[in-house]
Image (cartoon, rainbow, N blue to C red):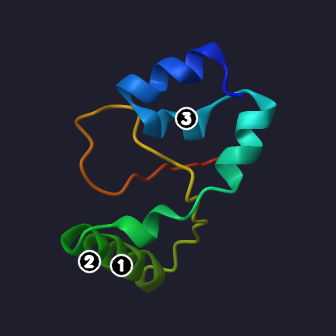
C-alpha cells in the first residue's frame, strides 16, 4: 500500500514516487523498468551523445535509472554531479 503522500503524488506528479523515502516504496521503485526504454527519439539521442562526451573526456559516471527531475520544467534527461568521489 502506498503512503498517503505517495497517493497524492499519483494525481500531481507520479514520477516523484521514485524518490519516496518510504522503505517499501523504495523497493518498488528499484523494480520499476528503466526510463531509458521510454525516451523519445530526440531525448535518447541527447542521452547517448552526452554519455559519448563523458567517455571521450574519460569522466567516470554511474547511471541511476531512478533519478528523476523534481521540477516540471525539466524536459530531457536528468544529470546529477557528485564531486565527493
Q: Position of residue 59 (x, y in %)?
A: 52, 72
The C terminus - image quarter: bottom right
Q: Residues within 10 Å of mark 1 (few under 14, many from 20)?
A: few
Residue in the foreground of this view, choosing between 64 and 8: 8
At a point 80% along the width and 32% down the height, the residue shown is 23
> Is 81 displayed left or right of 73 in the figure?
right
Measured along the vertical axis of the image, is residue 38 above or below residue 85? below
Q: Earlier in the sequence, mark 1 or mark 3?
A: 3
Q: Which mark is residue 63?
A: none
Which residue was labeled with disc 3? 17
Q: Are marks 2 and 1 in contact (CB under 8 Å)?
A: yes
Residue at disc 3, secondary structure? helix
Q: Nearer the viewer, mark 2 or mark 3?
A: 3
Q: Position of residue 27 (x, y in %)?
A: 76, 45
Residue 85 in sight in this render: no
The N terminus - image quarter: top right
At a point 49% along the width and 34% down the height, the residue shown is 16
Q: Can you name the residue that lies furthest to the right here?
A: 23
Which residue was labeled with disc 2? 45
Residue at disc 1, secondary structure? helix
Label 2 and label 1: CA atoms lie apart by: 5 Å
Q: Nearer the viewer, mark 1 or mark 3?
A: 3
Residue at disc 2, secondary structure? helix
Label 1 and label 3: CA atoms lie apart by: 26 Å
Q: Earlier in the sequence, mark 2 or mark 3?
A: 3
Which residue was labeled with disc 1? 48
Amino acid at each position: 500500500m502506498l503512503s498517503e503522500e505517495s497517493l497524492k503524488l499519483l494525481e500531481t506528479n507520479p514520477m516523484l514516487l521514485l524518490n519516496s523515502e518510504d522503505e517499501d516504496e523504495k523497493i518498488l521503485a528499484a523494480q520499476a523498468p528503466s526510463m531509458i526504454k521510454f525516451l523519445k527519439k530526440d531525448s535518447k539521442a541527447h542521452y547517448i551523445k552526452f554519455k559519448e562526451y563523458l567517455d571521450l573526456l574519460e569522466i567516470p559516471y554511474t547511471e541511476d535509472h531512478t533519478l528523476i527531475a523534481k521540477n516540471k520544467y525539466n524536459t530531457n534527461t536528468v544529470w546529477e554531479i557528485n564531486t565527493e568521489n
